[in-house]
Amino acid sequence: MIVDSAVYEDGQRTEVPAERRGPGSFVWIGLFEPTPEEFESLTREFDLHPLAVEDAIHAHQRPKLEVYGDMLFLVLKTARYVDPEEVVEIGELLVFCGPDFLITVRHGEAGSLAAAREALEGKAELMRCGPSAALHAIVDRVVDEYAPALDGLEKDIDEVEEQLFSDRRVNVAERIYRLQRETLQFRRAIAPLVDPVERLGRGQFPHVKEEVQEYYRDVSDHLIRARDQLDNLRDLLAGSLQANLAQVAVRQNEDMRRISAWVAIIAVPTAIAGIYGMNFDDMPELGWELGYPGVLLLMLVICTGLYRYFKRSGWL
């Protein structure tokens, strides 16, 4: 369905129907998960390439920038971090940008572009640059929304580190793996977009006006920083996973040493009791009046000595 549609003349929004727009004006149409039938009239009116139309209707495309004659077709991935579930919800935004039109198609959890449209409408000078300025506003909005998602990921990774090096015996391997998966998915949504935005900033396309190119370069810088931050988070998670595995091994060794120490201590009274439980007739200690308390004292002395030894050695 059509979410919003407007014609812009001389940097201002007008109520002129799209089919009656004059020279120098452009139309900006926003759609949400359109059907082929809904898209058919736009395809005829703006002479959209059928391959791009197919991609826009079915979605599930990787971030890319394609050129069809004098039209640009840009695929963007939006991101929203759901903190309670620790997942990155990825949406899709497909943009047709021609000399006198801009068509956006949203799928999934893609954020609303109303704020970007309103902000740009307040900048008449930039709006006079035409569809390339509107395209920049969209890309800038999408890239800006990466920051809260990155902050959410980073916060949860900090929590993992605190759990990992705390005194509590917790195994955070599953949580690390889930965050690693979300980080990789997020990076796949960002990394392929770096090159298209850099190309827009270098002025490789005729209807991307020179006045707008510097704005694309600024967005490119933010995008590269987001990609690098994800790389750092990915490396941090990989290191955390290795540290967790090492800690599990260390704790297992500590448990084995503790068990071995107690087995050695318990073995002493067990061995002595076993000797005097053999019921031989010729055992001198059996006729000694102090034999019973003497054996108990011997057990206590040896077990106490072993306990103090293992305690000093760090086994207990």
Image (cartoon, rainbow, N blue to C red):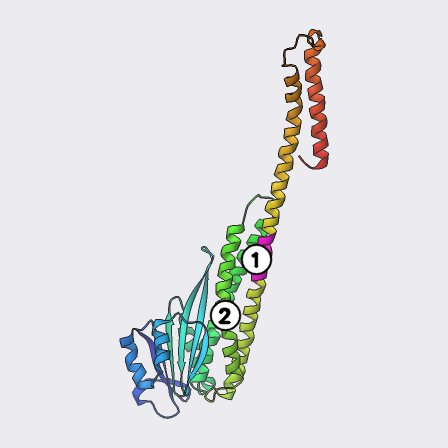
Circle nearer the N terminus (1, 2):
2
Q: Amino acid at mark 1?
A: Leu
Q: In this rendering, does residue 166 appear at all?
A: no
Q: In this rendering, does residue 230 appear at all?
A: yes
* Res 291 quadrant in image: top right
Q: Nearer the viewer, residue 20 or 198?
A: 198
Residue 26 position (above or below residue 95): below
Q: Is residue 237 magenta?
A: yes
Quadrant occupied by the N terminus: bottom left
Residue 158 position (above or below residue 128): above
Q: Which residues are magenta?
A: 233-242
Numbered circle sitting on residue 111:
none
Q: Position of residue 248 (x, y in %)?
A: 59, 46
Q: Amino acid at mark 2?
A: Ile
Check disc 1: other Cα within 10 Å, few if <14, some if 14-19, many if 20+.
many
Q: Is residue 58 magenta?
A: no
In the image, is 124 to the left or to the right of 223? Answer: left
Q: Which residue is mark 1?
A: 237
Quadrant occupied by the C terminus: top right
Tally of marks? 2
What main secondary structure does the magenta stretch of the protein show? helix
In the image, is 301 to the left or to the right of 144? Answer: right
Element on which disc 1 rests: helix
Q: Position of residue 69 (x, y in %)?
A: 41, 87
Q: Position of residue 127 (x, y in %)?
A: 44, 84
Q: Which residue is mark 2?
A: 190
Q: Residue at x 44, y 71 (%)?
A: 62
Residue 185 position (above or below residue 136): above
Check disc 2: other Cα within 10 Å, few if <14, some if 14-19, many if 20+.
many
Element on which disc 2 rests: helix
